[in-house]
């Protein structure tokens, strides 16, 4: 059995009988060896007795180092939560968040932690969003222009007036009993990085860098979100300035009563490793800066996104993330991602996450 990256972002298990069946981008390999019985009728048959198992892990390789030690459990693992993503995509606003919190509370499941997903930041689009309003197309080439919230979260009025994100977060924490509020940002700022010409971003000395995919990356499923990134490039902050960027961003969010962050789009960084010593060296510097800035425990996604329109995919998905957790659970607290609260498999997904020891949080359909 092995775990391999079938696309840039995700792993799935694979099984085989010989070495030639080990796929490219394998991250963990579990081998079973058996002693053979005596030859009978000219054939040797394996026996289940005295089986040996050999586990191969990428723990040490040049500058690469992995730790299989225990991890600090983040606070949100113990609370039921809600992510705003599927309800609003990048069109999230305070009014919609309030409606979602009210809907869940009235339904008897008040969330105790909230993730304000894509849509709260100040960004500019490199190209126009398509008419289908696909979240994956629309957010693939946007660039961050400021660490502060956008105008949707300033001066909002719905019975009350919120001058900024800080006042809004304080209100929903008090009104709906939220214990934790997180905000989402990409590891590189946004899907397309940061805007080099932005007055606020200039101090981080960003520049446009084009991604380069390795042979392993293109050997399996190609992520469609990479197309615009290849065409327009990434507004990249150099490793020497990335801690300053994270510290500014996270300090500002902390001043807004935001308790933590969801860090998205981490995989793209490995495609920017040229000129920086390769993907391992670059990722190491970014992760070190991120951890130094946050100084708290973290959960790590071990699954692909919830595909509500795939009726035969639900059990396969849970099985895959359970296998993935065998590896990732020794490195970080596994996160099996959110799921639709009114999906016909909702109870199945909730139970799976509870048994998996990972966070349980849902998403609402756009009609809510």
Image (cartoon, rainbow, N blue to C red):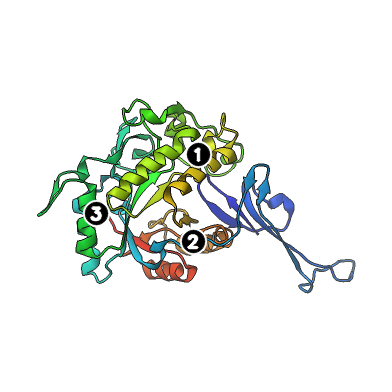
- Give the Cα distance between marks 2 and 3: 26 Å
Q: Nearer the viewer, residue 232 or 73?
A: 73
| Quarter assignment of residue 215 | top right
Q: Which of disc 3 and disc 2 is earlier in sequence?
A: 2
| Residue ID for mark 1 | 269
Which tag is nearer the camera, tag 2 or tag 1?
Answer: 2
Residue shown at the point (57%, 44%) measured from the top left: 220
Q: Is residue 172 left or right of residue 1?
A: left
Up the image or down, 149 lies above or below 48; here it is above
| Residue ID for mark 2 | 72
Query: Badge 3, how many Cα within 10 Å: few under 14, some, many 20+?
Result: many
Residue shown at the point (28%, 45%) measured from the top left: 120
* Quarter of the rendering occupied by the C terminus: bottom left
* Residue 366 in picture, x, y percent from top left: 26, 54
* Residue 169 in picture, x, y percent from top left: 24, 54
| Residue ID for mark 3 | 169
């Amino acid at each position: 059995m092995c775990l391999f990256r079938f696309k840039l972002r995700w792993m799935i298990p694979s099984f085989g009988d010989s070495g030639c069946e080990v796929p490219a981008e394998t991250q963990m390999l579990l081998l079973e060896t058996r002693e053979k019985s005596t030859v009978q009728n000219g054939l040797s048959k394996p026996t289940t007795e005295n089986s040996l198992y050999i586990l191969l892990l990428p723990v040490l390789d040049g500058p690469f180092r992995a730790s299989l030690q225990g991890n600090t459990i983040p606070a949100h693992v113990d609370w039921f939560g809600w992510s705003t993503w599927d309800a609003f995509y990048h069109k999230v606003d305070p009014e919609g968040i309030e409606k979602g919190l009210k809907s869940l509370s009235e339904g008897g499941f008040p969330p105790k932690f909230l993730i304000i997903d894509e849509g709260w930041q100040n960004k500019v689009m490199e190209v126009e969003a398509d008419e289908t309003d696909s979240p994956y197309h629309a957010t693939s080439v946007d660039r961050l222009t400021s660490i502060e919230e956008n105008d949707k979260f300033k001066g909002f009025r719905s019975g009350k007036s919120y001058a900024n994100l800080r006042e809004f977060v304080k209100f929903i924490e008090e009104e709906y009993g939220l214990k934790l509020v997180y905000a989402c940002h990409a590891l590189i700022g946004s899907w397309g990085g940061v805007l080099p010409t932005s007055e606020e971003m200039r101090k981080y000395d960003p520049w446009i860098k084009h991604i380069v995919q390795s042979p392993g990356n293109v050997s399996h499923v190609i992520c469609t979100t990479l197309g615009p990134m290849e065409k327009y490039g990434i507004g990249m902050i150099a490793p020497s300035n990335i801690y300053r960027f994270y510290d500014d961003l996270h300090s500002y969010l902390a001043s807004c009563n935001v308790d933590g962050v969801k860090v998205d789009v981490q995989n793209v960084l490995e495609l920017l490793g040229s000129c920086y010593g390769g993907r391992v060296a670059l990722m190491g510097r970014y992760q070190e800066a991120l951890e130094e800035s946050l100084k708290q425990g973290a959960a790590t996604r071990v699954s692909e996104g919830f595909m509500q329109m795939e009726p035969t995919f639900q059990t396969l998905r849970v099985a895959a993330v359970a296998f993935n957790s065998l590896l990732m659970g020794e490195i970080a607290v596994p996160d099996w991602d959110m799921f639709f609260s009114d999906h016909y498999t909702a109870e199945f997904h909730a139970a799976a996450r509870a048994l998996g020891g990972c966070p349980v949080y849902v998403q609402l359909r756009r009609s809510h």
